[in-house]
Amino acid sequence: MAVIGIEELNERLLPGQTIAGIDLGSVTIGLAVSDLSLRLASPRPMIKRKKFTLDAIVLLESLARDNVGAAVIGLPVNMDGSEGPRVQSTRAFVRSMADKTDLPFVFWDERLSTVAAERALIEMDVSRKKRKERIDSAAASFILQGALDRLAGLRRAHAGSADS
């Protein structure tokens, strides 16, 4: 397993593989997966956290079902760009995953992803109780969609420079 930059992701994926988005919380893990065209993020059921070994097993089983070739994990940097304890916890989680998988991970700035997810759920008139159940996976979708949009931009730029 390696931590890679978003710029390396297109070369790492094999045909037919998807990309996962992960919103790592202390109680739950939000999960989303791309479509095969790598254009659209869709939420998956959240994973209730127990202990790392069990969390890793459930997460990796879920990623295998969706033929995931890489994971984009939200990095919860502070609004001023500084890194606090939650960033350290996320980095430690990814380091611990290195023993369990060869999947590459991409860190993605997740500032305001939960806020955006909550607003979207409110606009869809999702009840407060159901929002609580869906917020982490919705946030994972926002994280992943941002990465997918960036990948699409990189592909367009690469195609444009290849045409020159």
Image (tube, helix red, strand yellow):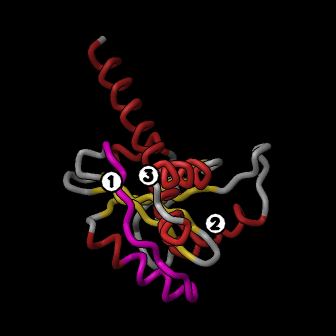
Which one is in front in this view, the residue at disc 3 or the one at disc 2? 3
Tell me the CA gap for discs 1 and 3: 21 Å
| Residue in view at x 23 percent, y 51 percent | 36
Q: Is residue 124 left or right of residue 27?
A: left
Could you tell me if the residues under marks 1 and 2 are in contact, i.e. CB atoms within 8 Å? Answer: no
Mark 3: secondary structure = loop
Quick one: label 3 or label 2, which is nearer the N terminus?
2
- Residue type at numbered disc 1: Ser
The Cα–Cα distance between marks 1 and 2, rounded to whole angstroms, is 21 Å
* In-front residue for pair 49/152: 49
Give the number of marks. Answer: 3
Q: Can residue 18 be seen in this view?
A: yes
Q: Is residue 60 above or below residue 33?
A: below
Whether 140 is among the magenta residues is: no
Q: What element carries label 1?
A: strand
Residue flagged by tag 2: what amino acid is it? Thr
Q: Quadrant of residue 101?
A: bottom left
Residue assigned mark 3: 124
Q: Locate residue 57 relative to residue 96 in the image: left or right.
A: left
Label 3 crowd (10 A; few <14 / some 14-19 / many >=20): few
Point out the stretch of residues depicted in magenta.
39-60
* Residue named by callout 1: 34
Separation of residues labelled 3 and 2 (CA atoms) = 30 Å
Instruction: Name the residue furthest left.
Output: 16
Front residue of 143/99: it is 143
Depth-wise, is mark 1 or mark 2 nearer the camera?
Answer: 1
Location of residue 40 in the rendering, given as x and y in whole percent from the top left corner = 32, 46
| Secondary structure state at the residue bearing disc 2 | helix
On residue 90, the disc is 2
